[in-house]
Image (spheres, rainbow, N blue to C red):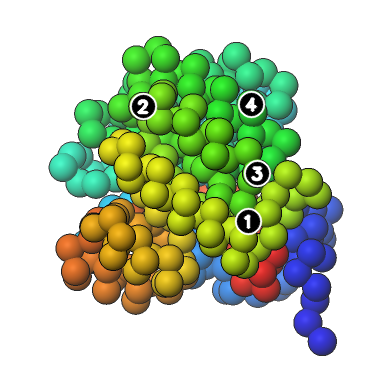
Amino acid sequence: MGVDRSVLFRLATSERFERAVRRLPATEARAWRAAHRYVAGRTRGEALAATSATLARGHGASVDFFGEQIDDPAVADGTVADYLALTADLPTPPADVWLSVDLSHLVLDTDPGGTADRLATLAAALPAGRRIQVGAEDAARTDAVLTCVVAVAGRGRAERLGATLQANLVRSPADVDTLLDAGVHVRLVKGAYLEATGALPHGEPTDVAYLVLAARLAAAGGPWSAATHDRRLQEALQLQHGPTPVEQLLGVRPEVLDDLASRGIPTRVYLPYGPNWFRYWMRRVAESRGA
């Protein structure tokens, strides 16, 4: 009998479990062998190589430096420095490369004002045509995440920003209006976090919510993308709305994204990298079990 998916998700967020696995070189090496297909590398150089390979396959890229749930402003400032160095090393436009970040990596929980300043710094460093996509986190952080994105968009940075909307959250129909008014790019996902309240069940209820939100985004005419590996949803959106940009995670059904790109549909691959890869990989394992 396999491990229950909710147990896997709890392990994916457990610092203690990560320390236990990574304490021994042999167990860490075994975990990395399983994880590396989903991770663009442990160093910036490896991530840049993965970015070049992704572009060569005809896909855009969204590069993320691993990190979340940080409470030390000095660490967050170091993260900003790492992102700025990454930005300087990326292939120059018109190469289709964006950045991605979780705001809890920039001390959102303890310093939301400072987080907005850090996000604005990263957005300002991007050349025209590039964005930094702000990732979805657990529902308890959604207000703070969206407030930060809207605030930075209000500083004249909307064209450099993207937000992530989770279809399974009951609040998302209201949030979509907020994001459309802010003028930022919207990445629509199903939602992967296990929420005690305020979320639809996975399966048909979330799929229907996804299609309804997609229709609203398409009708509004603003920039958005469908970030899903669900082939039925991908194809339904193409039929209903015409060429709709699709985003997928590195290592998950790459042949599907290749097929979409060959048909002229804009595609993008999420490329996370850095030494803190373990819990991200565990979440991929949990999601594969339906968590």
Disc nearer the start of the sequence (3/4) = 4
Which secondary structure, mark 3?
loop
The residue shown at (61%, 52%) is 168
The Cα atoms of the two marked residues, 2 and 4, are separated by 18 Å
Judge left or right: residue 186 versus residue 194.
left
The residue shown at (59%, 58%) is 206
The residue labelled by disc 4 is 144
Disc nearer the start of the sequence (3/1) = 3
Badge 3 amino acid: Val
Q: Residue furthest bottom?
A: 1
Disc nearer the start of the sequence (1/4) = 4
The Cα atoms of the two marked residues, 3 and 1, are separated by 14 Å
The Cα atoms of the two marked residues, 3 and 4, are separated by 17 Å
Q: Nearest to the eye among marks 3 and 4: give it.
A: 3
Q: Position of residue 95 (x, y in %)?
A: 20, 46
Which secondary structure, mark 1?
loop
The Cα atoms of the two marked residues, 1 and 4, are separated by 18 Å
Q: Which sits in the foreground, 96 or 71?
A: 96
Badge 1 amino acid: Ala
Badge 4 amino acid: Ala
Cβ atoms at labels 3 and 4 below 8 Å apart:
no
The residue labelled by disc 1 is 192
Cβ atoms at labels 2 and 4 below 8 Å apart:
no
Disc nearer the start of the sequence (3/2) = 3
Q: Position of residue 239 (x, y in %)?
A: 28, 65
Quadrant of image for the C terminus: bottom right
